[in-house]
Amino acid sequence: MSVSTLMIDGHEVAMAAGATLLAAAREVGITIPTLCHLEGLSPVAACRLCLVEIEGSGKLEPACITPVLEGMVVRTDTSRLQDYRRTVIELLFTEGNHVCAVCVANGHCELQDRAVDVGMDHSRLPYRYPDRPVDLSHHLFGLDHNRCILCTRCVRVCDEVEGAHVWDVGWRGEHCRIISGLNQPWGEVDSCTNCGKCVQVCPTGALFHKGDTAEEKHDDSSQLVALVRARQARQVAP
Amino acid sequence: MTPPAPLCLRCCTSAGCLASGAAELREALQRTVSRLELADRVEIRGVGCLGPCSQGALLAVDPDGVIFAGVRAEDAAGLIAALVHRSVLEATDGQWRPLAWTPATGERLDTRRPFFAHQRRVVLENCGLIDPERIEAAIERGAYDQLRRAVQDLSPVQVVETIRCSGLRGRGGAGYPTGLKWATVAKMPGDHKVVVCNADEGDPGAFMDRSVLEGDPHRVLEGMAIAAFAVGASRGFLYIRAEYTLAISNLRRAIEQANRHRLLGQSLFDSGFDFSVELRVGAGAYVCGEETALIHSIEGKRGTPRPRPPYPAEQGVGGLPTLINNVETFANVVPILREGADWYAAIGTTSSKGTKVFSLTGHVRWGGLLEVPMGTSLSMIVEEMGGGAPEGFTIKAVQTGGPSGGCVPASELDTAVDYASLQALGTIMGSGGMVVMDHTTDMVGIAAFFMEFCRDESCGKCVPCRAGTVQLHGLLQKHLAGDATAEDLAQLEALCHMVKDTSLCGLGQSAPKPVLSTLRFFRDEYVARLKPVAAPSTGVAP
């Protein structure tokens, strides 16, 4: 196995070929913020929070999918990146209706955590207050589009891990919305297995257990890794 | 006595002229000719774009080679009568005389005008001459000869080398060296590869690719087949936007004809080379012109881009190595093979070889389709060939590259059209749309127009493009309403850089360009729209 040595924020790190910059940064204790990324799911590089600067490249590259290369010199926390990350979070807050005080995920929300990480004490951009629906047709779970940040983790976990492909993205641009089935109410989608993985991986309170009230959603999306690894181990075993 | 030269009336059938009544004109001509039983002496031929679309409906008369503008169906009888009268006179004294006729409300166009005289038609060499509905007409003009030659006499390496030496660069906008792209795909391992033609032309004001496909579809199909031979592909997809109904029907017919003539399909020219082309019609998303989104769309998936690498050359349609070029790029292949790489490389500038087709629109007297050598100055195209702004107006700026491009101010019109010079001005060559704006144009309004376009066309996958274009459009609206402050202007500029630097694909990365470009050259218009700052209070009570 070939190994590449690279420099991240002044730290030297050796990584196996094929590893991502995100993994390399974690190796040396540097946290690069992410939202759409989730260990165990295919990467989409859509939230753009994990963009880093690579010396010699004019473009910013997403750490979640960029493989390490020998001799790379990477900066993960320049003032430009800090400002861009804060803007990404502001854009997410302003395009939806995120009211932490009444949210099931308050205190356990990745969007909220990232906002704290990037130092977003207020939004410099105006809130848009879109009119978005809530789907409570499923007997166990609910979907509040107001809190959805379109990270597509639910779409991927349902397709890639559960194999049910209940979720998809409908429409485009600012009108994008997560849809269940063929844009049916969630409760009417026969292919849903009620497994709850989508709720578990949702970084915000958009997908939640019915009956949870403010601050009561405590799902840990990282449990998915354990499931995926266990499954892989079983598939490899004779 | 020599038989009189065959009379041919070439009627433009392209979309622009159709809107000016070209279909009715063609019908009226046909009716008149058949009523007078002249069908064996006068050919009424539907052809592709004749050039100055703004002057439609256009009609060319051969053998005279004259072009009439603004011809209406009511002119048909008069024209046929004039042609008959001339041939009667010629029969009596054997003397050929020029056609003495002008349409009632139109005019005879002088083909020595700059619009025609400064053109160098390579891509468009058959456009406006041949009937795009008849493969025989294309074959008469040499269609599929170069494909035959490539398959029978050349090796794939030789073909790639010829394209590389010609210096041809991608005509879709980015200007990537075509030969290099072909060589990369050719070197990829595997027996199954794909060639894709990107005909998802979507920039406002751009109609170059549509005109080529409407006027000479076999040219593009042959270019694709030659590319397939060069890179080792056997399947081709032509991805075209649904709005191009005439181009789609011409292409469908052309593909069917080429299959029937065994110029596409299995074992071409008795060799082991197979190549089939499928037409894929888009569903109305601008982002599907981006190559990875286009590939997803061909695969039947949602048309959203994905990060590159892997590039389509490694993993494209169905995970196979895929060559994607734009319509005009493929249309350049045949003349390069026929005339040689050196011939092609002699046209244009050091870094940008060959010719470029432009669609000239907006506040200009002579709008339409034209093809010029690379390196021609913008002022030559706009002022000379296009005739400048209409009487009483002056040109303020020329927009190139559509929503991904920028505005070139009138003071910079001496700039030569090539990839590098336009980039230095903060715009791009783009696919060839050129929109002229006169002095009454509100540049902040233009920026807002393009931002609204990008806001509508964002696929919504990445945050900066999905939400950033909305905020940018809001800020521009605020400027237009006169409510913006200096802080808003600073925020507009900062957000432009953020969206440009962080978006996932070309759409988002270039969406702020029309704003940044107008800020660079017309900042005073933004400043003039700022909300007046209230005069500081003197603190003295009246």
Image: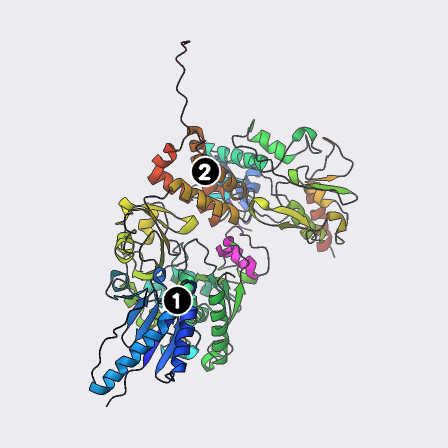
Give the total of numbered labels: 2
- Check disc 1 and report the residue beneath it: B331
Range of magenta residues = B286-309
Picture layout, residue B268 above or below residue B415: below
Q: Is residue B448 above or below residue B215?
A: above
Q: Quadrant of residue A148?
A: top right
Residue type at mark 2 is Leu
Q: Is residue B171 visible?
A: yes
Chain identifier of the residue bearing label 2 in the image = B
Q: Nearer the viewer, residue A141 or A95?
A: A95
Q: Position of residue B418 (x, y in %)?
A: 31, 54
Label 2 sits on residue: B476
**Residue B194 left/right relative to B20:** right
Q: Secondary structure at mark 2?
A: helix
Asked if the residues shown at circle 1 and circle 2 are in contact, with their CB atoms under 8 angstroms apart, the answer is no
User: Which of the image's four quarters has the C terminus of chain B?
Assistant: top left
Counting other residues with Cα less than 10 Å from the Cα at mark 2, is it few (<14), some (14-19), or many (20 or more)?
Answer: many
Q: Which is nearer the eye, B188 or B114?
A: B114
On whether residue B304 falls in the magenta region, the answer is yes
